Amino acid sequence: MIGLVHYLVFAGILFCLGLFAVLTRRNAVTVLMGIELMLNAGNVNLVAFNRFVGSGVNGQIFALFIIVLAAAEAAVALAILLNIYRTYKHITVDEIHLLRG
Amino acid sequence: MLTAALICLLVPLAAFVVQLFLGTRLPRGGDFVSVGAIGASLLAACWIFWQVMAGGEPGYQWSMVFRWVEVEGFTIPMGLAIDTLTAWMLLVVVGVSFLVHVFSIGYMHGEDRYHLYFGYLSLFSFSMLWLVLSDNLLGIFVGWELVGVSSYLLIGFFFPKRSAALACKKAFLTNRVGDLGMWLGIMLVWKELGVLRLEQVYHHVGAGAFSSEATLTIAGVLLFVGAVGKSAQLPLHVWLPDAMEGPTPVSALIHAATMVAAGVYLVGRLFPILTPDALLVIAYVGALTAFFAATIAIVQDDIKRVLAYSTVSQLGYMMVGLGVGSYFGGLFHLTTHAAFKACLFLGSGSVIHAVHTQNIWEMGGLRKKMPITFATWVISTAAISGFPVLTNGFFSKERILGDAMGFGLHLPQHFLIFALPMVAAVITVFYMTRVTIVTFFGEPRDREKYEHAHEGGFEITAPLMVLSAITLLGFAYAGPFERMVTPPSSTDYAAEQFAAFHYGESLRTGALDESHGAHAAEAGRGEAAHEEPAHAETGAEHHEAPWGPHRVDAHSLHTGHRAVLYLSLLALILGVALATLIYHRKRSQEALARRFSGTWRVLYNKYFVDEAYQAGVVNPLLWLNRLSAAFDRVVIDGAVNGSATLTRALSSGSGWSDLRIIDGIVNGIASVTQVFGAAFRRVETGRIQHYFAFFLAGTLVLMLIRVY
Amino acid sequence: MGNTLTLMTFVPLIGALVILLLPRGRDELVRWVALAVTAVPLVLAFQVWSGFERGTSEIQFVERASWISLTADLGAQEIPLNIEYYMGIDGLSVSMVLLTALLSVLCVIASWGITKWVRAYFALFLLLETGMIGVFCALDFFLFYVFWEVMLLPMYFLIGIWGGPRKEYAAIKFFLYTLVGSVVMLLAGLAMYYLMGGSFDIIEMARILPNNPDAVALGKVLYLALFLGFAIKIPLFPFHTWLPDAHVEAPTAVSVILAGVLLKMGTYGILRFCYPIFPEATQWFAPTLAVLGVVNIIYGAMCAMAQTDFKKLVAYSSISHMGFVCLGMAALTPQAVSGAVMQMFNHGTITAMLFLLVGVIYDRVHHRDIERFGGLRLQTPIYAGIVMVAFFAALGLPGLSGFWGEAFVFMGSLPSFPKATMLALLGIVLGAGYILWTYERVFLGPLNEAYSDLKDISPREIVSLAPLMVIVVYLGVYPQPLLELLDATLVDLVRGIV
């Protein structure tokens, strides 16, 4: 019988993979993919908690919101990346450090 | 009456406006506008005169009051008033003005600004008529100033000449000094009485509304100061001789016949409110003026200047007359003087027009070339010398001297008031004879000028003839004048003040009957003679004048007047003889001047009065002006700029402290912040993943804190 | 009818904005617009003048609205902050409003020759007009102060930008002087506001404060504070030195406004604030004011006589003439105070003429040194004639308006201050002295050949002078129309003090 713990562990692994990708990858697209993983880990958690702990469909609705937001965020982020690419001819995040103090 | 008065007054004003705006565009410079206007005025004046005379009562009075300023705070009406004196003055002013207008057509022909000249004459006529017709002191003052302006404009008519420019300024300023006194007098009357209409002023003064008699004396003397300025009395006489820079007809009209007589007219108008003390001041000023001006006239070379000083001297006579209470004498001399002095001035104008010089030593022998001018000149010279019976000057001058003598005999401490004019009478005859001889007799000194000389046209000779005829007709109007023009002594208080006047009156009625059988004048005087002794007696009996009871001493009176007659005749003969002796025998003036060089120099320089004013008044004033301007620039502006400098010094001090101390603290804080900033900036790598890692670390730390 | 004063005040402001929006380079259009805009207040002023009810001291054409209303918690007591938009005129201000509106139109005509930054010039000028009319209409102290300051700034720029060689110095001097005055004035205003328990209403102040013991106790100090502010504007000796500088450096039209309107604000302010609100202090101060007035008359005249700069001479003559106003105010008799206000109006017209006339000659020869002229009457007879009218009006010739103000001042002040009045009379001789001397040096005598091709006055310049001449002559012959406007108010004012 698959219980709540399984879902949480799965989500945790997923989150860590995403985090790992965000922190270590140089390619901005990969970083973005990592962020997507992290968001989806959160989604899994929400749905799981709703199924096993809460009642109603609140969790699912939050998940849906996040999916929509993630899509929008991805679109905006990709647009930014495209612009960065146009300017620098690459999308290596290490090289983009204009905000350095 | 109102219509006539308004026509008389306003038509010349309208002519002035027309000349001012349209003068250049009208044919002949529009001289016919001004002449026509004054002609209309003359007709109106004659009509008024006829009405007044037909009325026949001495105290005739017509008045018309207009609402003028009428507000809650105060009310000042303006109005016109006509009495017998006004009627005479109107006739004199408009009559002389008309003749001068006519004369000017010939005299001013071809001058620049011809139209303006006639415009100014019209303006003058209007102002003078306003002065005469006005029924209140403020109105008189307005007219007073306006005649001053017209005089300024006309004296300065030849303004491209520097001397004319200076003369008109001097005339106006000197008059302003006199006006100052007059204005103060008017204000004093206003303060004390709260009214300015003459009629009301008489009434209030009569009712004793003045706070004290001393104040009334002061008011009277102050008002007289105005007359001193306008009538060129000592010490404000300096402007009149200089005013001869104006065109000669103007000198005849303004500076001999009418405007300068305004001062006398004013004193006549104020007669009822003048205290004996004030009258005494007037008499003294007049006597001194009559004498000193006459002495100056002896040595002048400019024909117009001689006449100018003669005018000053004659105005002094008028003042003496009024001052000793001879109301008739003073005012009648105004009338007669207007005629013969205008004639003399126009005669001199005719001469100047002919020879183009004003220096009598460049003339000579002109009687052959200019017979009409010569004849009229001699007639008016006889009049100014007081030639008995035939000339109008006789009636007025003898009266003044007679009354002055009575006054002097009665009050021996004031004998000077008689003595000075008496001596001046000799001098008058002397200098007039001198001018006549030098100008018209003997050999021509300047051949070329003599050859060019010729009698002027009809417009020049006609006024001369008319004026000399009037001069000769003196006996015809002396009587009516005396009968009609009586002092407005309508109130008891005024009557009391008029002891002096009554004294003169009684002198006259006693004297004239016997002394010179002036038959022609007799007829007209008949009626008045009946009333006036009674009047005079009431005056003498009921009222104690400050200088003692005025009981008429018949004996001293008769001897007095007879003595005056003899003295005058003596003066006439003496003057003519002396002048003939000196000047007809070709004894040159230089010889005489050498003989009395000191006196001559003093007289020739007019007692150095002008120089004294320059040194004593003008220069200190200019110096004071420069001083105050410097004070303004250096001290006051210095203080202002100094405070600005001080403020700037203070601000630079505070600027320094700002920089070093306040800013020091601020900058200190800033540098500390900078040090920390430099440390912390290392954290800001600009790499997003580093930030993310920090964020993660931070979250973990927070979680750990939460858990434990 | 209900908002005439508001329209009169703010139409110039709107006009200024319109002018700023006009396209660059259309200078001629700008001038015509400015003329049209200034004509509006003039028409309205005539409307006010004809509709003004004579013979009463009531405030007329009142407009009232709450403007800023708060309650301030000031520690112990709560004072409501109540500033009103309160406009209205009485006999004191109606003639001033008329004068301002008229002079503004004439100044626009006289400014036709300005070529530097035309839009800015006329916009500032119109702003100035708003301030001036507002000052004379405002009956709320705060509102008055706002207009007072609104006026200051355009004046500063008009002198500082379009002025003569020392314009910066003159402008800053004018600005600082006036600012010092207005600061002190504001302090006094605030004090009055607290004494009133939170109201800036001038009319109420005049009704309540004379009976308020605290106000009476403080009266002298407050009087002096207000007085200082106004004395600088008049300008009274020794606060007068900004005036010659400002006048000499300012362009013609601005000099006209300065002398014609701004100086009057000083005396207007004294009559509007000091007199009705602090009657006791007024009586206490009257002798000093009379002495200051006489000093102004004599000292101004003497300084004028020493000047060789035509414009500076006229400036000092203004100081002298404003002395008559002060003397008349100090006398505290209905006649003298009426004379003083008449003198304010008449001096406004006469001195405006004088400055315009100086401007005429300056535009042609570009200097104002009296000594370098001579005989100009031969070359420019019409100009010389007009100058003569203005000069004679200035020296107080009867028959021209300048006389009556002085005459009534003298007649009214002789009973109060006989000695001062006699001294002041000297001023009319000195006045005649410098005026005739100047006329002689400039216009009489032989023609100075340097000016043998000088052109006579142009029609435009005559248009700017003619209305003033008509007024000067008309009021000189018949001063009743002016007197009846102001008399009732002033009689009440004097009655309230004595």
Image (spheres, coloured by chain):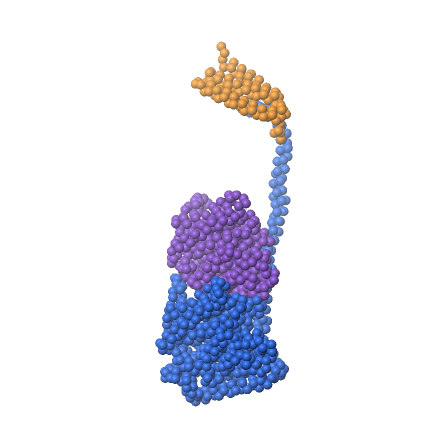
Chain colours: A orange, B blue, C purple
* Image point (56%, 69%), residue name: B164
The location of residue B666, given as percent across then percent down, is 61, 40
**Quadrant of the rendered image containing residue B273:** bottom left
* Image point (43%, 67%), residue name: B11
Looking at the image, which is closer to me, B596 or C427?
A: B596
Looking at the image, which is closer to me, C272 or A72?
A: A72
The location of residue C448, given as percent across then percent down, is 60, 63
The location of residue B247, given as percent across then percent down, is 53, 71
Looking at the image, which is closer to me, B676 or C13?
A: C13
Task: In the rendered view, tell whether residue B698 sits above or below residue C448.
Answer: above
* Image point (51%, 78%), residue name: B373
Task: In the rendered view, tell whether residue B109 sits above or below residue A57.
Answer: below
Q: Tell me the quadrant of the picture where the C terminus of chain B can be found.
A: top right
The location of residue B449, given as percent across then percent down, is 59, 76
State the residue lying farthest toward the top.
A1
Task: In the rendered view, tell whether residue B645 sits above or below residue A63.
Answer: below
Residue B138 can be seen in this image: no
Looking at the image, which is closer to me, C116 or A39?
A: C116
Residue B163 can be seen in this image: yes
Q: In this view, does B94 lie to the left or right of A95?
A: left
* Image point (57%, 19%), residue name: A34
**Quadrant of the rendered image containing residue C455:** bottom right
Q: Tell me the quadrant of the picture where the N terminus of chain B can be found.
A: bottom left
Q: How many labels does the image show?
A: 0
